[in-house]
Image (cartoon, grey):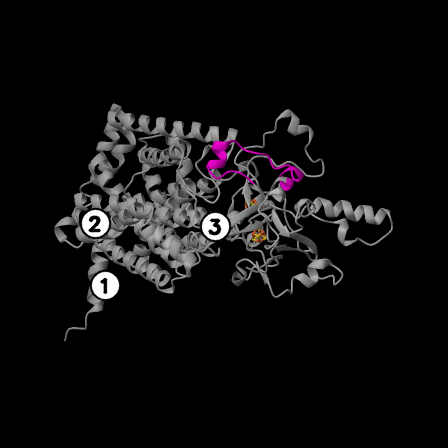
Amino acid sequence: MARWGMVIDLDRCTGCAACEVACKSENNVAAVSVEQADMGRASSWMKVMAHVEGEFPDTTMHFYPRPCMHCDNPPCIRVCPVQATYIDDEGIVGQIYARCIGCRYCANACPYMVKYFNWYGPEWSEAERQHLNPDVSVRPAGVIEKCTFCHHRLQKAREDARAEGRELREEDYQPACVDVCPTNAIIFGDLDNPSHAVHTLKDDPRVLRLMEDLGTQPKVYYLRPRD
Amino acid sequence: MRQAVREKLARMSNDEQILLRPLVETSRSFYIVAGLLAAVTLWGMFAYYLQVTYGLGRTGLNRPSYWGIYIICFVFFIGISHAGTLISAILRVSKAEWRRSITRSAELITVLVIGFGAIQPIIDLGRPDRVLNVIFNAQLRSPLLWDVTSIGLYFISCTIYLYVPMLPDLAIIRDSGIKAPRLYRFLAAGYRDTPAQRARLERVIGVLSIIVIPIAVSVHTVIGWIFAMTLRPMWHSTIFGPYFVMGAIYSGIAAILVAMVVLRRAFGLQQYFKDIHFDYLGRLLLLFSLLWFYFTFAEYLTAFYGGEPGEMRAFWAKLTGPFAIPFWTMVLGCFIIPLSLMSRRSMRTPRGTLIAGIAVMIGMWLERFNIVVPTSVNPRWEIESIGQYLPSWVELSIMAATFSGFTLLYMLATKFVPIVSIWEIKEGREHSVREVADRVAEYLPESA
Ligand code: SF4
Ligand code: SF4
């Protein structure tokens, strides 16, 4: 059984935020007005966080692209009263939009703040509407959503592989952010499969995981910048 | 009041005359106050209508402040509900005779306030239409589900605990025929106050008052656990269960005191809510103000001494940061005011306890605010420690409506049941005086 995970090389990330944009259009994440965004109501399943170190003027800045960590021991799913957020047997943490009651308990339980709530229903212009991704369901007002590792791409890749009578290859299933990153800073694959790049990278001496000490066992690994 | 009713009333005992009068006689100011409260409640319902139609966006909530006023009010109201049950149950079990005139009004607070508290998390839902999913898709590891279970049980048991001790009074009203004969025939459920029935009633009350105590304790423990079970700074704390229970009882006592002062004025119950009651409850309030300080101090010192960076951000946000005003007002309301007033005999009067009671209620509301909001806007994930939360008018209107709705229903209830238990007073006069004398004699060594 695969165990999907991600390695992000912070040395390569330039903070261009192409992954953010690709994610939004791939997953039908609606934009909100400026006022709403200022209130903290914009959704960005993938978010490039800027982290500044040192005192001015001797500062270094690093960018942390942050998706859902797809924790192996996710605190978010334990607290959901209706099992609307779950972890599947390939380690992907998903949401059931049609079941979520919108209590936002999971959002409070996630230490990485990657759960986004639909404060209003989504709104698109006519032009945007024509480019919605038919493979991803549109979320109604009042439910929680978050990064799914583009789970729909996995389903599609699997069907294709089955139709062609072959095994699933590493390049068959890659989330939108990985596809679009111009510096190949994001690497994705099966952590348990020795032929996948992430398998070796996850044991790199530069590896760090966010708030690992909480015992969440995140499946997103970062490669520390080399200074 | 109609002539016939007046004559019937005149034939009854003195206690009955005083305590049943509010059921048949309603003053002008009652209607005015009730009208105002109803208006506020309707306004709040309109605000909720907007929220349901347009979405939770109508509140001031955001990321990372996912929870706000509704969750604060939820904890606050369920906390108040500990007034009735615990106080009246504990006093009954421990045979405290002075309870007799205050049990009913306290139990009534409990039942109503559980209802108003329990709807708060539903108001807070993004999808209230799917609320039944908590039954159909129940996920038992969620503290929210523990809550649904224990509050459900609590509501049922408290309603029974309110109703059963009311039976003899309902029978008195039925037999007097002063009001809605058919309604009271139904409510009194064939109770005739025969010695056998009375004995059974007392047994049932005895059992209920024991059952209700652990349930009440579980309710607020589990509410504390909603927060404590997450890994968040200043929430993830083992003291939260007992801390919440203690706070709940504290705010409950304050609520009883305020209600008693108001009822005493409104219905002329000086003979029933006497100085001694305010003195005793005032002492209880004093005890709890000290307990409150002990718990709060223990909680904050532990967080401070550990000095974990995540915890410290929430900690300083409260003590000196943007939440310093609510924090220190809380200390004033929950500790300094009640301590300095209630430690003085001359202040344990209706007026003194009223001031202390109101201070404690405000303080306890703020305590819940200080638990929910500062942690929400200071998540462990430091980079996003920039949150802010300002409740919208929709949230404030719904909160006002909750307060007014509760007060309105409480007022209406005083028109249907005597707010002081008639039969318990009578029982006190007829039996307890002797019983207590016997009991005290029993405590003492046999005299030679
Ligand atoms: S990062 Fe947050 S949302 Fe994602 S699995 Fe972990 S706890 Fe859940
Ligand atoms: S917001 Fe939805 S997914 Fe999250 S805990 Fe509540 S019901 Fe579950």
Q: Earlier in the sequence, mark 1 or mark 2?
A: 2
* Residue bearing mark 1: B439
Q: Residue furthest left?
A: B346
Q: Are marks 3 and 1 in contact (CB under 8 Å)?
A: no
Query: What amino acid type should be assigned to the residue bearing mark 1?
Result: Arg
Tell me the quarter of the picture where residue B355 sits.
Answer: top left
Q: Residues within 10 Å of mark 1 (few under 14, many from 20)?
A: few
Q: Is residue B392 left or right of residue A163?
A: left
For the point 71% across and 44% down, which residue is it? Answer: A152
- Are both tags, 1 and 2, on one chain? yes
Answer yes or no: is residue B194 visible.
no
Q: Which mark is residue B383?
A: 3
Q: Which mark is residue B337?
A: 2
Q: Quadrant of ligand 2?
A: top right
Above or below A140: residue A50: below
Residue A88 position in % (x across, y down): 67, 53
From the image, which quarter does the C terminus of chain B lie in?
bottom left
Q: Tell me the CA gap for discs 1 and 2.
A: 38 Å
Answer yes or no: is residue B72 visible.
yes
Q: Tell me the CA gap for discs 3 and 1.
A: 66 Å
- Are both tags, 3 and 1, on one chain? yes
Q: Label 1 lies in what chain? A: B
Q: Residue furthest bottom?
A: B448
Q: Which residues are magenta?
A: A22-43
Residue A203 position in % (x across, y down): 65, 65
Q: Label 3 lies in what chain? A: B
Q: Label 2 lies in what chain? A: B
Q: Are marks 1 and 2 in contact (CB under 8 Å)?
A: no
Residue A20 counted in the magenta span: no
